[in-house]
Amino acid sequence: MGCGNGKDRVLDALSGDRPDDAPVAVFTQSSTLSQMDAVDAPWPIAHSDPERMARLGSAQADMFGFDSARVPFCVTVEAEALGCEVDLGTRTSSPKVLPGSFTMDPFGNGSSDPSDIPSPSEFMVSERIGVVSGAVSSLSKSHGDEVPVIAGVTCPLTMLSQMVGAENMVVTTITDPGIIGRWSKEITRRLIPYIRLLEDSGADVILLGEASASPDLIDPGMFDTLAGDHLRMLSSEGDSSKVLHICGHVEPILERMSGLGYDALSLEGAVDPYLARRTVRDEVRLVGNVGPVDPLMVGTPADVIKACGKSRDAGFDVISPGCGIPIQTPDANLLAMTSHHRG
């Protein structure tokens, strides 16, 4: 099991009381092929079986000493609960939302309406909503005294891009941003009780992922209009620590992200860690920003230790992969990551 004080270390760091040796945790996708084999919880069954999901979610702590346990391992749970068809993938491929359940024409011809989605109560009885909450409950019982239980939740813009296609969503942010706001409002109404369920099940931290709010996809000048309202609302829900993850080069929106009420921001390796700390000052904690591909998947243990040191020296409060870990990531590199704060 992970380090005995891992839970206190991470939660203290997220509250602004960072230890001298910053904790090392995984807030995003954490499973690898090695972990799947070690705990007999391979994909795709680990996406739909709560006990296997829990076993795989805790493997990062048990095998490598990360100060965390985390589920689920994909971003399709919420879209499936909204009525989308999902392909759960294979042992080596992630689940994906299949097209066709909803449509969005950027020019307003024949689009689905937000009223077409299941009600909040129907959303909450979706099978995989129960799988994730069941896995969180199991993790809380087995590991919750040792490490924080982290639950990932996919945010409205990212869900909408899955439901109607990323290109359609992005173009519609320009042609009809009002309809994007209507969709986001309705999706948020369903995510709020989901967050409450995850907290009631034992989640200590909620990682809210809004990849589609990245400046790599939408105009940074529209961030407040398209994403700010629902992200602020979700940050204030419940009593768990809230961490916001937005992919890519988020430098143009960092200051606005820091004002949304989150305990911490999870940043990719693409972001200069020193610039990030200067930008947000002491307003919010920082999680990251070790590159998941380089160095974690393709680098050497020495490369990993160097990257961890850079994030630490820049003032990151929790050292973490900057985004989901590739499933091919070697054990030696994950072990190097957790050894960095002890060595």
Image (tube, rainbow, N blue to C red):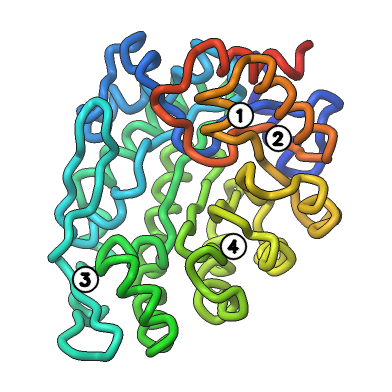
Question: Label 3, on which residue?
Answer: 117
Please tell me which residue is depicted at 50% across the width and 77% down the height of the picture: 226
Asked if the residue at tag 1 contacts the one at tag 2, i.e. Cβ–Cβ closer than 8 Å, the answer is: yes
Amino acid type of disc 1?
Ala
Up/down of 171 relative to 39, above or below = below
Q: Nearer the viewer, mark 4 or mark 2?
A: 2
Up/down of 57 relative to 102, above or below = above
Amino acid type of disc 4?
Ser
Q: Is residue 222 left or right of residue 327?
A: right
The local secondary structure at tag 4 comes to loop
Residue at mark 1 to residue at mark 3: CA–CA distance:
35 Å
> If the image is split into quadrants, where does the N terminus sit?
top right
Please tell me which residue is depicted at 25% across the width and 69% down the height of the picture: 164
Residue at mark 4 to residue at mark 3: CA–CA distance:
24 Å
The local secondary structure at tag 3 comes to loop
Horizontal and vertical percent position of residue 84: 18, 59
Dot 4 or dot 1, earlier in sequence:
1
Horizontal and vertical percent position of residue 190: 34, 64
Task: Using the image, tell me which numbered label, if any, was put on residue 25.
Answer: 1
Question: Label 4, on which residue?
Answer: 236
Visible in this render: residue 1?
Answer: no
Up/down of 176 relative to 236, above or below = below
Horizontal and vertical percent position of residue 96: 25, 48
Q: Nearer the viewer, mark 4 or mark 3?
A: 3
Q: Residues within 10 Å of mark 1 (few under 14, many from 20)?
A: many
Question: Label 2, on which residue?
Answer: 318
Amino acid type of disc 2?
Val
